[in-house]
Image: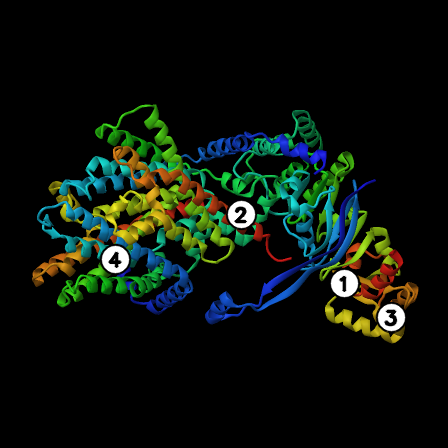
Amino acid sequence: MSEIQLEQRTKRSLLFYPKIYLMIITQDIKSKMHYRADFFISILGMLATNISGFVAFWLIFQNFPSIKGWTYHEMIFLYAFSLLALTPVQLFFDNNWSLRFAVYSGDFVKYCFRPLNLYFYFVSEVVDVKGVGQFVFGLAILIYSWEHLAIPVNFQTILLLIVAMISASLIMIAMMTAAAATCFWIMNSGMVMVFLFRFKDYAKYPVTIFNQAFQIFFSFIIPIGFVSYYPSLVFLRPGHIHPLSYLTPLVALVFFYGSYKLWMRGAMKYSGTGS
Amino acid sequence: MAEIQTKKLPFRRYFALTRGGILELTAFRMSMALDFVGNIIYMIVVYFLWSAIYESTPTGIVNGMTFSDTLIYLTLASAIFSLVEVYLVWQMGRDIQSGQFSLYFTKPTDFFLYQFFNQSGNIATGFIVTFLPTFLIVDFLSSWRIPIGVNTLFFAISLIFSIVINFCIDFMVGTLCLYTQSFWGINMMKEVIVLLLSGATIPLAFFPHTFQTVVMYLPFQAIYNVPLQILISDSLSFVDYGKYLGIQAFWSLVMILLARLFFRHASKVITVNGG
Amino acid sequence: MSTVIELEEITKVFRVLNRHTGLKGSIQDLFSRDYKDVVAVDHVSMKIEDGEMVGYLGPNGAGKSTTIKMMTGILEPTSGKILVNDRVPYQNRKLNAQHIGVVFGQRTQLWWALPVIESFRILKEIYGVSDAAYNKNLMMFDDLVGVSELYSKPVRQMSLGQRTLCDILASFLHDPGVVFLDEPTIGLDVSMKSKIRELISVLNREKGTTVVLTTHDMGDVEALCKRIMIIDHGKQIYDDSITNLKQFFGSYRTLRIQPAGYDSISQEKIEQWTKELLVLCPQAQNVVMSSSECNLSLLVPEDEVALITVLAAMQEIVRVKDMGIEEISTETVIRKIYEGEADKKADVLAGEEV
């Protein structure tokens, strides 16, 4: 590499991508707020779904004392945790749903002309404000159940919570990235995304309700167990933490890296249509 | 009322749409397969979830429902869902947003009927591909607990009413887009409300008493709860059947009227503002 | 003068699946190994110098976009050597992208919902443009086309012309060494076209940026390019200046006649007169007649028959109210090249160039 090239490389600080990202999404949200009705209705719609989940649990516990040994507040904790873990993919990675349209129409090439990482550039285009309602609601019921369960609030637990949250959210991000990436190879990729997206609804249940085979399935094949259950164990059963809970960050990183690589592979393979 | 009579005339034209709808859908074989697998997984999760829930009860019967009662109820509800759910709101919303909507007014067909028969292809396919297999599997797995007899006949009739009522609700939500330009949030809310209040997510038997009474007066339970009761209740008299079907017939008429009136009012928005 | 773009025997071969129809066919295709090789670009070589503005032409499917994709680093050639700004484009896409600008005719690369000035600001950060350079460029852009009026407008609210304008400006914002413009004037009205052409011309001149322009629009070619390259069926069939191009077919001239008494000239009339001309003047067999409203155009190959002879013959067929003689238009030349008439002459020219 010539000197000039070296210079170009090092010019980019660690803050390069975060800075660009902040610029883009600030502007994007500003422009979205112009469409006020849509803004609020979308948030309300999302909120309705979240509340319905809450009501469902409430109804169940009106009639039954526990689910496989888990009490009402513990289940709400799991639910809250899952909502929070599912918000980042909703907020920041929503553009993946449009990937197949960009690819089929040939518009995707436009992402290849800037000196930016393709995945970053593509994902950064869209921020979906619907997730905000989910975040607020999830946080609210997390605090609610946290208090009821008398989980201590200290530096350690907060740190654990943040790490657990980040790891858990990476799982869903990984799943949707991999699902979206299929559009580089097959036609009906939209169906794959819808199919995998449904699994997020199962994240709020403890993996222990399943038999052995399905526990393995929901832990390692479609790892939604790591979205809420395993990380939550650290808070709900501090006495005897399941060994898999410690693996959450590792599983998250592995799955995310794998899905990212798959996506990039597909993007490289693709180079617009025809001549 | 005069409008309902003119339905009889251009049927052939509308059935052409049905056929078109079926052909279009069967082109997406993979999406159907994925849909099917997704439903199977949903049923598996429901199975495990509710067996875990029921484990916590001493008697095994809660509010008159045993574990297998609940299971059959919920899985059949999901089967009904795949039958009555049409992508009407998506289609209408997209057409409105793209401006294609005004083209409908140039066609010599009644919009309401046009959409109904357009979607009927989906419904017919959904019946054969998802509903019937699910029904048979559930029946088989529950050791033929579902009574097959005259109730099945009434069940079939009841389903038709369910389809109509659900269609009308979707139609009204789609019409709302003419006002708000944004349909995703409203559609979410509709889905959540319908599924929850109709007993499809949690059987109505588990609702607190006052809540139950209120819900009984709403049209949503006429979509899911009524056909299910017809099918699985033992020993219903003809009067009972009559009552159930009567409720559905009532709601069907009301909904059709509401939907058509609402649409007529909303179309004035287009003709005045130019779409 | 340094070479900014260099292609040497660049070839791109695509392996394309032989697709079958029908449902059975689709399933077959999933497991099929029946590929065929499509040569999109066939041993193309070229050298583009710093500051040049080159037109890159070719019919649809000729291999234009494929060549451009290789130059911009998003496609890897099957064989051959390619250097842009002394770098191999596909080996380091991001680095290469730092020093090029790209504009698509119809697809904007700006952020759709944001006011265009915000797009510019973001680009400033992405490309690491210094404050001084950024402000200097914006001032220049404003002087040229008054872009400051558009700053607060989101791209989605702009007309096609405004959008294209902003896209072009954006591509020059980071002072790249090369800018690739793909059909920049497509879909625009005449006044906007000329405004855009003027802009491109000035930017190329003032900034000394090398510009590669792909286009179907002859107006673009005539207004902007001194040098054009033509590619067809993957092969480069012409690489020289426009003046030489006309000389290439220099022996052609166009004779325009306005026959008296005709408001419009039908196809049958043309056929009739062509036959009559042939009778009077047998060497005029390759004269091509066409009409536009009340005017008749005759393309005369002067190495076969003198234009005067043809004119004399036409005067016996119709009463000539008005006439004129023109050099062959670039458009006609290029059309002829597309139609393959250049083959013989191309061989001759290629032989001469080496």
Disc on the earlier residue, 3 or 1: 3
The alpha-carbon separation of the residues under discs 4 and 3 comes to 79 Å
Checking the image for residue C5, the label placed there is: none
**Residue for point 37% across, 40% down:** A247
In this figure, which residue is indicated by the disc labeled 1?
C291
Classify mark 2: residues with Cα within 10 Å, few (<14), some (14-19) or many (20+): some
In front of the other: A30 or B56: B56
Residue A195 in the image: state x and y as whole percent.
37, 53
Q: CA distance from mark 2 to mark 4?
A: 40 Å
Residue C144 at x, y percent in the picture: 71, 33
The residue under label 1 is which amino acid type?
A: Ser
Quickly name the residue at label 4. Answer: B80
Q: Residue at x 83, y 57 (%)?
A: C328
- Marks 3 and 2, how far apart at CA: 61 Å
Residue tagged 3: C284
In the depicted structure, whether residue C322 falls above or below residue B56: below
Pointer 4 with pointer 3, Cβ within 8 A: no
Lateral position of residue A135 relative to residue C32, left or right: left
What is the chain identity of the residue bearing mark 2?
A
Q: Which residue is mark 2?
A: A264
Q: Quadrant of residue B247?
A: bottom left
Residue at image coords 66%, 47%:
C90
Indicate the quadrant containing the C terminus of chain C: top left, top right, bottom left or bottom right: bottom right
- Residue C224: tell me if it is visible: no
| Farthest bottom residue in view | C279
Residue at mark 1 to residue at mark 2: CA–CA distance = 55 Å
Q: Is residue C330 left or right of residue A247?
A: right
Task: Report the Cα–Cα distance between label 1 and label 4.
Answer: 68 Å
Q: Residues within 10 Å of mark 3 (few under 14, many from 20)?
A: many
Which chain does tag 4 point to? B
The amino acid beneath tag 4 is Ile
